Amino acid sequence: MTNMEFGTVGSWIDGAERTTGATFEILNPATEAAIGEVAVATPDDVEAAIAAADAAADAWADFDPVERSQLLGRFADRIRETVSRLARTETLEMGRSLGASEAQAGKTAQYFDYYGGIADKIEGETIPIHGDGDVLDYTIREPYGVTAHVVPWNAALVLTARSVAPALAAGNTVVAKAPERAPLSMLTLAEIATEAGIPDGVFNVVTGGEARTGRQLTDDDRVAHIEFTGSTETGREVMKTAADHITPVHLELGGKSPNVVFPDADLTRAAADSAKAFWNTGQTCFAPTRIFVHEDVSEPFTDMLVEAVEEMDVGPGIDGNTIGPLIDAAALDRVESFVESALADGATLLTGGARLDRDGYFYEPTVLANVADDAPVSCTEIFGPVVTVSEFGSESEAVSRANDTEYGLYGLVWTTDVSRAHRMARKLEAGTVLINEYLFASQQAPSGGYKKSGIGRAKGQQALENYTQTKNVVVSITDE
């Protein structure tokens, strides 16, 4: 194993690494070469992680909030000191451009900074009660205790921080399940947490490899809250398990986001930003892959979009390429099958549409036109570098077609008409609507899904609602 950069790693439990299970290789999707191997968490490992989090829960909840804030700030500082290491790890295990991974690692630190700053400001309320002033009614916001976090591979660092930072800030302990296909960056993050002084047992990570790891986490009565980001199908199963235990859940699930371009839009900017749907090789749940462009500007917009896409460099992310590989061979086969099916049904290929003849799981960024709204490529989350372009005639048609999906994560609108922008923001069924902007992300701004794209909100102060429960206290202050 000495030729593999990362060697053998395992779960991070109670402040130490644990490698007791069978191992599997982690492949670099740009080369198909093994870069390390991971020991799969055994049932005993998962039990140990839950027990460690449970044992640490009371002490962490009782920490002086100011001290908890300082520890999270120290964790953020340590992340910044290791940005290059974290970014390289994430790029090698999942393929993203190294520059994008560096930005994501920096954003990871920002989450712990932000929620560290809130940790000592989580307050209750005094409730005015009608009467003679003989009753005091107030609320306390308390942590749940042990929280489980199931994080996907496509942005493991920042998505771990997005849920773990508010959970820790609120006084909860964490058991996170590392994504099977890209676990190394999350395991590194847990190690850094211990180095930064986060107490043992507060932040634990168990490795995947088998579905039973996630089931064991979500099926344990000691787990008081579940955070899941992933596919809608798996989200349903998480909800079913949680229902057996009456465990609250926060879910961010699939997406098939609309991107609506009106004739008064800045077409140059709209086309350039629409091409960013291929960021992370299209492996993002919020990617605006359904483009609806007004018939009056369809031709010039589409020409500019295709030109922008064809200028993208495709290759290993570690070399700085804009578009990296798909995560594995199965993902590559899936993308290829969607495109081939669309072309067989009469779609027009504007650019792309083929695997790259090289090592790694590379597929050309692909733009399709003349695709029906109900075609699989139009309504299924592909999780790959494929977008469709369709014309529309009226605002009402654009709204109807944009909302004709089971998902509701993001929506994009391009227009210089302020009234139209606000109308569209109200009418689109999505948790986030971006006007003349894409890839805007802020830890301060809440995000989440409508319809089958999820339940609850991540980020911002609203995220704290996922990790605190409200207790009402009523005190009689009469002398009688």
Image (cartoon, grey):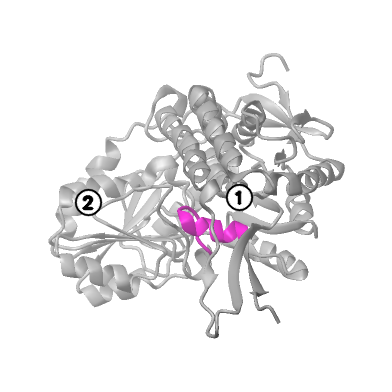
Percent coordinates x, y for residue 220 in the rendering: 80, 57
User: Around disc 1, counting alpha carbons within 10 Å, would you say few (fewer than 14), some (14 to 19), or many (20 or more)?
Assistant: many
Please tell me in which quadrant of the rendered image residue 398 appears.
bottom left
Local crowd at mark 2 within 10 Å, few (<14), some, or many (≥20)? many
Residue drawn at point x = 56 percent, y = 27 percent? 89
Give the residue pinned by disc 2. Answer: 270
The residue most toward the bottom is 131
Residue at the outermost top position: 2
Q: Position of residue 426 (x, y in %)?
A: 31, 72
User: Of the residues shown, which amino acid type is indicated by label 1?
Assistant: Ala
| Element marked by disc 1 | helix
Say above or below: 119 vs 473.
above
At 19% across and 65% down in the image, what residue appears?
A: 294
Question: In front: mark 2 or mark 1?
Answer: 1
Q: CA distance from mark 2 to mark 1?
A: 37 Å
Helix, strand or loop at disc 2?
A: helix
Asked if one can make out residue 175 in the rendered structure from this viewpoint, the answer is: no
Q: Position of residue 292 (x, y in %)?
A: 28, 63
Nearest the eye: 106 or 89: 106
Q: Are marks 2 and 1 in contact (CB under 8 Å)?
A: no
| Residue at 58%, 59% in the rendered image | 466
Q: Is residue 464 magenta?
A: yes
Query: What is the span of residues highlighted in magenta in the rendered image?
Result: 456-468
Image quadrant in which the C terminus is located: bottom right
Left or right, 47 with respect to 107, comes to: right
Residue that label 1 marks = 167
Q: Nearer the viewer, residue 470 or 372?
A: 470
Which quadrant holds the N terminus? top right
Q: Is residue 217 above or below residue 190?
A: below
Give the mark, 2 or 1, whose residue is nearer the N terminus. Answer: 1
* Image position of 331 (left or right of 37): left
Q: Can you give x and y, in whole percent of width and height, for residue 76 in the image?
A: 52, 33
